[in-house]
């Protein structure tokens, strides 16, 4: 808001965009308000300037319902050099049809997701990501963690309105969320009617492939093998695009270290739902089912950790990636700062997996040193079932997800 004339907060429905924007605005126009037969939306469609009048910063909530508002706000920002005049919120990316200008240098975009464990109060935040990179982590007890509690965090997700829901029913929100997406939201984005059976098959396939590197063609084959769905490759791409435009997917891009060696790095993104609870709902899983299938839960736990790690990284101006080469060397998560400093993170549910994870991280570091590349400054195993945060003798950090913070 100190840099741009307007700021657009984008993200999935129900993640807290409107609350955040209202806390920083002096007046507001709610485009989706049904009062007086959606009078605000009608006014905005007739003459956008009618809803822009008010004390600044002025909130324009769900602006994408009247796309012409984008150009109107860009025009108002151009009139003077004041910053932070408008705050827009949007839970879908509309078609560019009807939008004349990109808003470059006028409207800044901020992506918002669901809450991290630190934000919900389920992580103490005693172990700072930044402190690890500054080599300031001190050995400390962080408290026992129960497997059922970790499962609860995944099933509940980081939705602000779901935090006080009983454990026995907290998974229902994500189920109904996906139903609303398939039945209503996808159509509202562009007015195209899609085959709900095929959409559900894709959603289930994304759930089965959560936290993995799979191409669109593999998703298509999976849909055919499991759900016996015949679907065109272009249709898969279209459905994935619309889910991304609704901010339901948040794929983790591949990291490139600009190696001088001839080693080939895989460029596939790692598949993620924007919140782990959606992956649970996509699988029609329950807490008991996950408790009895720790292999599946391991992928969902990875989503939880990488979801939080991305938030902590971005808070510190860093970016989250994953790393894998053609020889099978891989790192679950990479945090890179603008100056090129980076850290490699492995994610493991049980403390009995820490030794193997640390060995893999050290192997990656040795390869990069041998090939003259920039090695990671930080090596860390993020663990679920451990009650200590410490630095091993080999230099690898071990940190519980329930103690990690920005």
Image: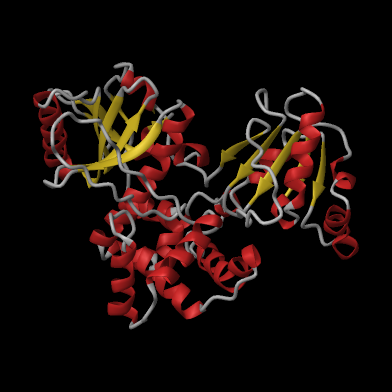
Q: Is residue 127 above or below residue 53?
A: above
Q: Quadrant of the C terminus?
A: top left
**Side of 384 where 42 appears, left or right:** right
How was the colour assigned to the protein in this rendering? secondary structure
Q: Quadrant of the N terminus?
A: top right
Residue at the (91%, 62%) spot, across then down: 36
**Side of 360 where 303 appears, left or right:** right
Residue at the (61%, 55%) spot, across then down: 92
- Compare residues 6 and 116 and report the one nearer the observer: 6
In x, y percent, where is residue 84? 73, 28
Q: Is residue 136 above or below residue 269?
A: above
Is residue 62 at all visible to an observer of this figure? no
- Compare residues 117 and 75 and report the one nearer the observer: 75
- Compare residues 391 and 234 and report the one nearer the observer: 234
In x, y percent, where is residue 156? 47, 56
**Side of 191 where 287 appears, left or right:** left
Residue 187's quadrant in the figure?
bottom right
- Total numbered labels placed on residues in the image: 0
Is residue 181 at all visible to an observer of this figure? yes
In x, y percent, where is residue 335? 34, 32
- Compare residues 57 and 295 and report the one nearer the observer: 57
In x, y percent, where is residue 168? 48, 64
Residue at the (45%, 25%) spot, across then down: 316
Q: Residue furthest front?
A: 100
Residue at the (29%, 33%) spot, across then down: 399
Q: Is residue 207 above or below residue 115?
A: below
């Amino acid at each position: 808001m100190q840099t741009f004339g307007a700021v657009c907060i984008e993200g999935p429905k129900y993640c807290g965009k409107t609350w955040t924007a209202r806390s920083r605005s002096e007046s507001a126009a709610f485009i989706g308000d049904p009062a007086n037969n959606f009078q605000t939306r009608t006014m905005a469609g007739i003459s956008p300037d009618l809803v822009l009048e008010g004390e600044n910063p002025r909130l324009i909530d769900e602006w994408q319902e009247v796309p012409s508002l984008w150009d109107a706000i860009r025009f108002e920002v151009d009139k003077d050099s004041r910053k932070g005049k408008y705050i827009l919120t949007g839970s879908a990316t509309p078609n560019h049809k009807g939008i004349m200008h990109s808003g470059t240098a006028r409207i800044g975009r901020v992506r918002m997701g669901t809450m991290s464990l630190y934000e919900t109060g389920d992580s103490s935040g005693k172990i700072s990501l930044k402190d690890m990179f500054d080599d300031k982590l001190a050995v400390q007890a962080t408290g026992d963690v129960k497997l059922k509690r970790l499962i609860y965090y995944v099933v509940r997700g980081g939705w602000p309105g779901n935090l006080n829901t009983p454990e026995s029913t907290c998974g229902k929100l994500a189920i109904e969320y996906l139903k609303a997406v398939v039945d209503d939201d996808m159509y509202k984005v562009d007015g195209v009617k899609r085959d709900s059976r095929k959409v559900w098959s894709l959603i289930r396939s994304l759930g089965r492939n959560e936290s993995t590197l799979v191409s669109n063609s593999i998703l298509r084959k999976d849909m055919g093998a499991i759900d016996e769905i015949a679907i065109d490759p272009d249709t898969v791409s279209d459905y994935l695009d619309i889910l991304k435009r609704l901010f339901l997917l948040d794929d983790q891009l591949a990291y490139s270290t600009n190696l001088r060696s001839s080693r080939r790095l895989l460029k596939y993104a790692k598949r993620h739902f924007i919140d782990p609870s959606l992956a649970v709902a996509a699988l029609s899983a329950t807490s008991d089912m996950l408790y009895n299938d720790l292999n599946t839960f391991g992928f969902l736990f990875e989503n939880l950790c990488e979801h939080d790690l991305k938030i902590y990284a971005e808070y510190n101006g860093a970016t989250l990636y994953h790393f894998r080469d053609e020889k099978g060397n891989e790192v679950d998560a990479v945090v890179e700062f603008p100056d090129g400093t980076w850290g490699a993170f492995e994610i493991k549910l049980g403390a009995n997996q820490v030794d193997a994870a640390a060995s893999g991280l050290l192997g990656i570091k040795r390869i990069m040193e041998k090939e003259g590349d920039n090695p990671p400054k930080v090596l860390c195993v993020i663990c679920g079932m451990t009650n200590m945060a410490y630095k091993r003798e080999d230099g690898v950090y071990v940190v519980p997800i329930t103690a990690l913070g920005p």
